[in-house]
């Protein structure tokens, strides 16, 4: 034990040997069975450059979790800080953070899980050292999981893969992230893991010789151009190899970065100078180039990635970064968790904590309906785009973000009041997907309220967690009568737009059974709150009506009920571009216009446009009218008799 203390303090000069020895001696006397794993956990935490309290928390964690002593004794032995960290980590171990079964959670299970997630996120925000110790503890749990029964091993692995590895990535702690990913893959997909491991092992000798040769070449090349750099081979982890094979549909031999080197230089200018030397010497592979220095990843990761064709005609991945970037890349938030000033490190740390606060806020606003793993996966894994405001402020957003997502990214009130937008100066629908480099100007005049249609999943108005959380929170916090009114209006207005006249009560019993409600007002309320989506409910209602008319729905489709010719009359403001926007919407949905007419009515001067469309099902029909009623200037949409009406 004394040898361990001396060794860890020799590696980390900021740690105090006497203090650690006292804590270790107490643990050895109290419960020697915990000593080995406790010291392993403390090793992991110390190697992340964490402080004395964090290392001591790791030493006493297992004893705290076993609840053998009271808080006062832990404080007396390890100090208040270490005891608080260990207790916060132990508090997370009570309930799984994953759904406990594939079926819907029991009410108590669900409530416990939601509270556990909130408690975890609150602890992480309050003191990020809790996150570091928890992540290290999960790595250690995975190392020992090979000795557990299958069900327990799989639960630990899935939790690590879906929650803790993304969290480690978001906090930038790559030393832990890669091991969490590799070990979780080993237990969840053992055959694939072992196959890749065997292939790597069989060629390890040759690969190490090749990489060392490339390291010498790169080092000499840079030195010849006056660039002083550390160059070393970089191990590629099995999970990242597997993920790249899956994503690109390639074999192990085709994965570019199985052979990889890393270049660490002193300054930012030397990063780009080294890149120039590499690209001028060897042919680079364009689609394998990423500049995360100019455009850092959302978690703050900065590095230049490129791949080249080496002299042996095989690919070689190269990463280029400064020493500061390298420390941040390996240790993430651990590299600067204690900064309190206005330095870059403090801003990076603040950004990570802001992200955790957002996840907690969204989880609360969604009332636990989104699992933590879903939120983390969305926030971490999605690639980013960069979109500008009219004043030139650049916002980063996930790929797939829409105009409405952008409005909510600016501010919740801007999102709620959004009624239109211009993308690069051109009017755009709210569901238009944005691309990097575009400028978006949102029309949010007045104090508008959000439309319930924006939550409809099949309309794709939003794709980000932020927008969905804000909308869900808004509609679920309305009064019951407001929700009923919104749901009733939504359902009946769509029926009217589709030209369907039906006595709802005639089909109420079957509809209530289908949605598992006791009365029609409950259906309206769940529609208005966003708990139920309109399209499936409305489609089921139309299906019940068709069945009541003694038509088999599937047979009717084959016999000509769909495709149908729908004739719509649109009354709107006589503004320039209205017809263009309508036809553009038709085109975007891949529909066919068989005929169109337009005129200006007198004396009100409104535009009257008639469209004949071929539609292929009720879901498509509902989607068309739902989009059309929100086009700027549209005042009324109704279906007219004409063609194969289907009524």
Image (tube, grey):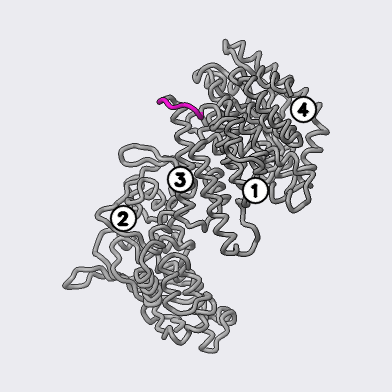
Secondary structure, mark 4, is helix
Cα–Cα span, label 3 and label 1: 21 Å
| Circle on res. 417 | 2
Q: Looking at the picture, how far across and down is residue 143, in whole percent?
A: 74, 39
Displayed quadrant of residue 248: top right
> In the image, which is nearer the foreground, mark 2 or mark 3?
3
Q: Which residue is mark 3?
A: 358
Dot 2 falls on a residue whose secondary structure is helix
Which badge, 2 or 1, is on the more N-terminal residue? 1
- Of tags 2 and 4, the one toward the viewer is 2
Does the rendering let one see residue 365?
yes
Asked if 232 appears above or below 385 in the picture, the reply is above
- As measured in the structure, the alpha-carbon distance from the residue carrying label 2 to the one carrying label 4 is 58 Å
Q: Give the class, few, some or many, for how many residues have Cα within 10 Å of label 3's Cα (few <14, many ≥20).
A: some
Residues 307 and 418: in front is 418
Sequence-first tag of 4 and 1: 1
Instruction: Give above or below for 538 relative to 332.
Output: below
Please state which of residues 491 and 566 is positioned toward the viewer in this rendering: 491
Residue 614 belongs to magenta span: no
Earlier along the polypeptide chain: callout 4 or callout 3? 4
Q: Residues within 10 Å of mark 1 (few under 14, many from 20)?
A: some
Q: Residues within 10 Å of mark 2 (few under 14, many from 20)?
A: many
The part of the image, by quadrant, that contains residue 584 is bottom left
Point 47% across, 53% down: residue: 364
Expressed as whole percent of the image width and height from the top left, the position of residue 351 reads: 45, 36
SS assignment for the magenta stretch, majority: loop
């Amino acid at each position: 034990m004394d040898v361990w203390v001396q060794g860890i303090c020799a590696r980390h000069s900021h740690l105090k040997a006497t203090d650690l020895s006292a804590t270790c001696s107490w643990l050895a006397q109290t419960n020697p069975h915990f000593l080995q794993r406790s010291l392993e956990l403390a090793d992991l935490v110390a190697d992340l450059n964490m402080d004395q309290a964090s290392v001591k928390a790791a030493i006493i964690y297992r004893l705290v979790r076993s609840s053998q002593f009271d808080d006062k004794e832990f404080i007396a032995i390890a100090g208040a800080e270490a005891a608080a960290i260990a207790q916060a980590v132990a508090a997370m171990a009570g309930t799984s953070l994953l759904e406990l079964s594939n079926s819907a959670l029991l009410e108590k299970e669900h409530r416990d899980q939601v509270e556990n997630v909130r408690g975890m996120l609150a602890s992480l925000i309050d003191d990020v050292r809790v996150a570091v110790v928890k992540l290290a503890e999960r790595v250690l749990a995975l190392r020992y999981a090979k000795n557990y029964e299958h069900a327990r091993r799989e639960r630990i692995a899935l939790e690590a893969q879906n929650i803790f590895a993304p969290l480690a990535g978001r906090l930038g702690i790559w030393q832990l992230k890669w091991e969490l990913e590799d070990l979780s893959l080993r237990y969840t997909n053992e055959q694939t893991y072992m196959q890749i491991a065997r292939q790597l092992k069989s060629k390890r000798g040759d690969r190490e010789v090749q990489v060392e040769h490339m390291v010498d070449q790169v080092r000499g090349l840079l030195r010849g151009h006056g660039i002083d750099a550390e160059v070393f081979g970089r191990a590629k982890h099995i999970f990242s190899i597997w993920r790249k094979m899956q994503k690109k549909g390639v074999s192990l031999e085709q994965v570019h970065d199985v052979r990889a080197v890393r270049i660490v230089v002193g300054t930012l200018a030397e990063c780009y100078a080294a890149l120039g030397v590499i690209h001028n010497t060897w042919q680079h592979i364009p689609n394998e180039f990423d500049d995360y220095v100019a455009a850092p990843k959302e978690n703050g990761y900065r590095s230049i990635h490129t791949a080249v064709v080496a002299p042996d005609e095989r690919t070689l991945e190269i990463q280029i970064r400064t020493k500061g970037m390298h420390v941040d890349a390996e240790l993430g938030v651990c590299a600067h968790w204690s900064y309190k000033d206005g330095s870059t490190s403090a801003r990076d740390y603040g950004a990570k904590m802001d992200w955790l606060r957002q996840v907690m806020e969204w989880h609360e606003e969604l009332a636990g309906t989104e699992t933590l793993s879903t939120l983390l996966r969305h926030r971490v894994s999605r690639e980013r785009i960069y979109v500008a405001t009219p004043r030139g402020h650049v916002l980063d957003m996930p790929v797939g973000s829409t105009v409405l997502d952008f409005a909510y990214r600016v501010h919740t009130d801007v999102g709620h009041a959004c009624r239109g937008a211009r993308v690069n100066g051109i009017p755009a629908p709210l569901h238009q997907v944005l691309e990097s480099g575009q400028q978006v100007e949102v029309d949010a005049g007045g104090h508008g309220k959000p439309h319930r249609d924006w939550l409809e999943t099949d309309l794709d108005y939003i794709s980000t967690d932020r927008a969905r959380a804000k909308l869900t929170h808004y509609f679920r916090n309305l009064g019951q009568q407001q929700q009923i009114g919104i749901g009733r209006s939504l359902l009946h207005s769509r029926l009217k737009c589709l030209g369907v006249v039906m006595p709802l009560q005639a089909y109420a019993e079957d509809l209530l059974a289908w949605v598992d409600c006791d009365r029609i007002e409950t259906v309206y309320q769940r529609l208005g709150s966003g708990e139920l989506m309109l399209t499936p409910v409305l489609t089921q209602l139309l299906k019940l009506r068709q069945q009541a008319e003694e038509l088999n729905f599937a047979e009717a489709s084959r016999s000509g009920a769909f495709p149908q010719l729908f004739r719509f009359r649109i009354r709107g403001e006589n503004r320039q571009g209205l017809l263009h926007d309508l036809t553009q919407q038709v085109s975007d949905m891949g529909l066919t216009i068989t005929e169109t007419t337009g005129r200006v009515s007198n004396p009100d001067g409104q535009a009257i446009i008639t469209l004949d469309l071929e539609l292929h099902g009720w879901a498509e029909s509902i989607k068309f009218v739902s989009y059309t009623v929100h086009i700027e200037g549209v005042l009324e949409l109704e279906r007219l008799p004409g063609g194969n009406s289907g009524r």
